[in-house]
Image: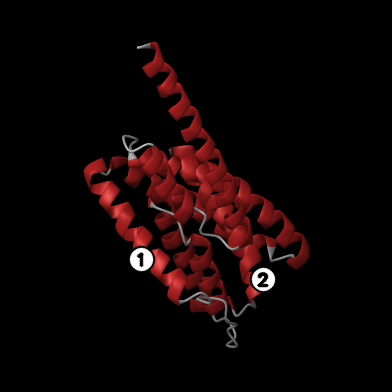
Amino acid sequence: MIGAHHMGLELAASGWGILIAGAAVAGWIDAVIGGGGLVLIPLILAVMPQLAPVTALASNKLAAVTGTASAAFTLVRRVKPDKKLLALYVLVAAVCSGAGALAASLIDKQIMRPLIIVLMLVVGLIVVFKPNFGTGESKALPTGWKRWAAIVAVGLIAAYDGIFGPGTGMFLIMAFTALLSQNFLSSAAMAKVVNTATNLGALIVF
């Protein structure tokens, strides 16, 4: 019995070691390119199969906040985006992400687990086959409807981030580049700030 108890502790310690290493890698990926959740969420569910899927999502948000916030701080210092516009996006993102997280917490875990698997496959395929997805530069000048469309896009993407998450940064960059006629670096700076807000909004609800 004592031996089994010690083995359980050893397995628990090794499991925590794997999770900590995975969180570090996922945080680095989030800071550099985004999509760390594609690494951390399946890792959490594999190491802790009895864990509720929504708890795995919340744990991923905790790790993602660090990576996105550090990247946002660095990029904003270089690019200096429109503060008023960015503040509006942050507010919309935090509220919609929180709503998405609330929806995720209400979904039955028997439905949530396969849903997570499907979403991971879809986002993973996009990343593999469209690595430059959303990194082009729009030449058209932004019009009034495009500015409103950008707000709607932020809300929808933020809600998705609250429900699931991986790929959010890429989707935000795509939206900002297409709708605000920005280059990749400017879009990435705004995306990191907004993504930090979506992570915090969801984390508060979780």
Residue furthest front as drawn: 3
For residue 80, which quarter of the picture? bottom right
Badge 1 crowding class, 10 Å Cα cut-off, few under 14, some 14 to 19, many 20 or more, is: few
Of badges 1 and 2, nearer the viewer stands 1
Residue 86 x, y percent position in the rendering: 62, 61
Residue on which disc 1 sits = 122
Closer to the camera in the image, 204 or 84: 204
Tag 1: amino acid:
Val
Percent across and percent down for residue 87 are: 62, 56
Q: Nearer the viewer, residue 90 or 109?
A: 109
Q: In which quarter of the view is residue 129 placed?
A: bottom left
Q: Residue at x 40, y 16 (%)?
A: 3
Find residue 172 and report its horizontal and vertical position in percent: 52, 66
Q: Nearer the viewer, residue 167 or 162?
A: 167
Q: Please give the residue where the numbered disc 2 appears in the rendered image.
A: 186
Horizontal side of residue 165 vs 77, given as left or right? left
**Colouring style:** secondary structure
Residue 85 visible in the picture: no
Residue 135 on image: x %, y % = 57, 77
SS at mark 2 in the image: helix
Residue at the image point whose x is 49% and y is 63% from the top: 154
